[in-house]
């Protein structure tokens, strides 16, 4: 998962059907660990945002902070979609 930090808040993108999002909608209390299990835990409350402008802003920021990994993620997604279409 790729994240950015904006004014002290951790921001990340996840698909709308992800288990992370479902859990946050049930209970917004979260514990984040950036890196390994030995990393410090950050306890807080999560907020889901679906506003297109905000999602686009975080997406652009992720591309700026993690350009290679974002490109690889997009390439992998396109490849998987092509394979799924060929199998239909």
Image (cartoon, rainbow, N blue to C red):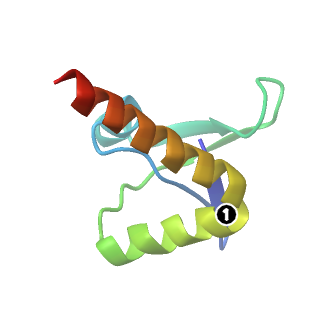
Q: Quadrant of residue 35?
A: top right
Q: Residue furthest bottom?
A: 53
Query: x, y percentage for residue 26?
Result: 29, 35
- Classify 38 as above or below 32: above
Q: Quadrant of the N terminus?
A: top right
Q: Quadrant of residue 8?
A: bottom right
> Which residue is label 1 attached to?
5
- Classify 80 as above or below 48: above
Quick one: 21 or 60, which is closer to the camera? 60
The residue lying at 30 percent from left, 62 percent from top is 50
Quick one: 12 or 31, which is closer to the camera? 12
The residue lying at 50 percent from left, 38 percent from top is 76
- Classify 46 as above or below 59: above
Q: Quadrant of residue 32?
A: top right
- Crowd band around label 1 with a 10 angstrom C-alpha radius: few (<14), some (14–19), many (20+): few
Query: x, y percentage for residue 49?
Result: 35, 62
**Residue 79 placement, left or right of 66:** left
The residue lying at 67 percent from left, 69 percent from top is 64
Q: Secondary structure at mark 1?
A: strand
**Observer able to see residue 2:** no
Total number of numbered labels? 1
The residue lying at 66 percent from left, 73 percent from top is 7
């Amino acid at each position: 998962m790729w994240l950015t930090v904006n004014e002290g808040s951790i921001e990340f993108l996840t698909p709308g059907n992800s288990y992370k999002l479902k859990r946050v909608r049930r209970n917004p209390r979260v514990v984040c660990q950036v890196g390994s299990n030995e990393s410090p835990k950050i306890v807080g409350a999560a907020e889901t945002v679906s506003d297109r402008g905000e999602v686009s802003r975080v997406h652009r920021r992720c591309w700026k902070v993690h350009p290679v990994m974002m490109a690889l993620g997009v390439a992998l997604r396109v490849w998987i979609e092509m394979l799924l279409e060929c199998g239909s």
